[in-house]
Image (cartoon, rainbow, N blue to C red):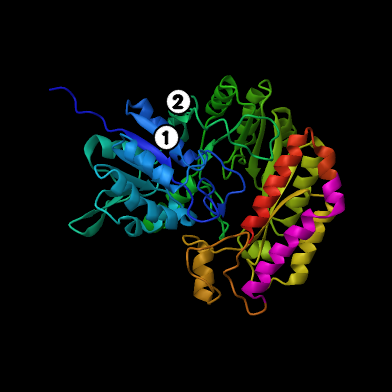
Amino acid sequence: MPPARKPKLTFVEPPPVGRKTPERLAGCSYELYHMPDLGNLYAFTWLDREGYPVGYLDAVSERMAEPAFLAWVARDDSDIYVIHSVVLAKEGDLEYIPKILRARPQARIFVHGPEPTRVPEEYLIDPRVVVFRGELEKSLLEYLETGDSPGISFRSNGAALHRPPRRDLVSFDELPIPKRDHPALARTLKGYHNPKLRRRPQTVMLASRGCAYHCNYCVPLSTSFASEMEHRHNFGRKPPQRFASPERVIEEFREIQRLGYRAVMVLDDQFLSRDSARTLAICDGLAELDLEWGMLSRADLLQDPKVVRALRRAGCVSIDIGVENFNQRTLDSMRKGMDVEDVYRSLALLREVGIEPKVNIMFGTDPQETFAEMDQTVATLKQLKIDNVMFAVATPFKGTPFYDKIKASGYLKDDTDKINPIGKAVIEYPQLSSAALTAYVNRVYRRFYLRPEWIWRRIRSYRSPLDLVHDLQNAAKLFKTAE
């Protein structure tokens, strides 16, 4: 007998519901700029490699409103739609799932991501929905091949059933390099922009999964967070971090260059490690490629001048650093595992070699924190002439130890899923109200970015009028998100 026809799977990002667009890859914020969703792209490429027909629709990038999106679904021929869901997208995704199934009744929907992993029952609103908890790739392929897999949840006779968790996590080098030149991606993949990088076109990539540290507030990248919640729930610990080999990292950079990209944002929770030999090997392989790139890092991993200089020679121009606070007591309370002095040393070293730091600051993680301490953190940033800062209110995301701690202490004022780390505090401390904390962050943004000296330095950095246009667009989005 001829083999059965392989089903066609289309990976979709539905239009946003409401004024703000959830950021699905980072998973913990609303968008200031749109990024390709690697949470879907790895599985998309994995199935394409295995001979499955695959499609891809980013309705946000396509600027599709709901009617156009549902009309597209009704015309489409896919058997399965795959949605990568996070907490800020849950409300919209739960609205779209029945609408997609009404538009195409013969289809099924597969849902994955951190929020479906945490509360799979909430997504099982129809027997045609299957939830893939934790990591997606191996479980998805096994389910398609056999009809069952570890790590899935589904409904049978009205009851929610949960298969045991998957234990055999993918090693990073097993993952295929995302197929950025696939015809299904051609419409959108070169239209993304990250303002921290100047060259275009741009893309994003990963070189690891997971994080070895234990910051209690942290919401890691959504692909890591799903795996982390599944492991903590079933095994009581975080999953091991998995790094790509230097050869794999260099190969993907070269592929990106071959496809005509000129800039890359590496979005690993922890791209650097204590293994400086790996970092130096990667940098040696990238030095000749003439690609502009940025990454995320802890400050205590940016202490070695040899490593930081190698990063700059390899084309790194921007590094996001989770500083969070310049008060050591506050850092200790959030289990940051880092000294404030590490921050000062890393910022000085980055400035010395010409890499632009982007600093992330969070207010409200410590019940003892005062407005005077917050003011001192802001004053320190100004003294250090840090131009790129993201201010946020501490937000206890469900699934983190910080959420458990804040809820148990009685400090959680709002336990809904409608959270906004930039513009809405949900914590109420005895000496620090949620309203005052929200107002403080909104006020700090305006005061910090409307200073004449900041504006002048920014204008002097422009290479073209387009830089001004991008700054104005991002400022408008930022202040809108903070509302």
Residue 453: say if magenta: yes
Task: Give the residue at mark 1.
Answer: 56
Q: Position of residue 148 (x, y in %)?
A: 24, 43
| The residue positioned farthest toward the left in the image shown | 1
Sequence-wise first label, 1 or 2: 1
Taking the spot 64% from the left edge, 26% from the top edge, the residue there is 262
Quarter placement of the N terminus? top left
Query: From what the image shows, is residue 450 above or below residue 311?
Result: below
Taking the spot 64% from the left edge, 73% from the top edge, the residue there is 435
Say the numbered circle drawn on residue 193: none
Quarter placement of the C terminus? bottom right
Q: Position of residue 324 (x, y in %)?
A: 67, 57
Task: Give the residue at mark 2.
Answer: 182
- Magenta span covers which residues? 432-456
Q: Is residue 151 visible?
A: no
By secondary structure, the bulk of the magenta-drawn segment is best described as helix
Q: Nearer the viewer, residue 479 or 292?
A: 479
State if disc 2 and disc 1 touch (CB < 8 Å): yes
Packing grade of label 1 (10 A; few <14, some 14-19, many >=20) is many
Left or right of 315 on screen, residue 131: left
Q: Position of residue 331 (x, y in %)?
A: 67, 61
As helix, strand or loop, the secondary structure at mark 2 comes to loop
Residue 6: say if magenta: no
Q: Amino acid at mark 1?
A: Tyr
Q: Nearer the viewer, residue 184 or 408?
A: 184
Query: From what the image shows, is residue 175 above or below residue 96?
Result: above
Q: Is residue 10 visible?
A: yes
Q: CA distance from mark 1 to mark 2?
A: 10 Å
Q: Nearer the viewer, residue 212 or 92?
A: 92
As helix, strand or loop, the secondary structure at mark 1 comes to strand
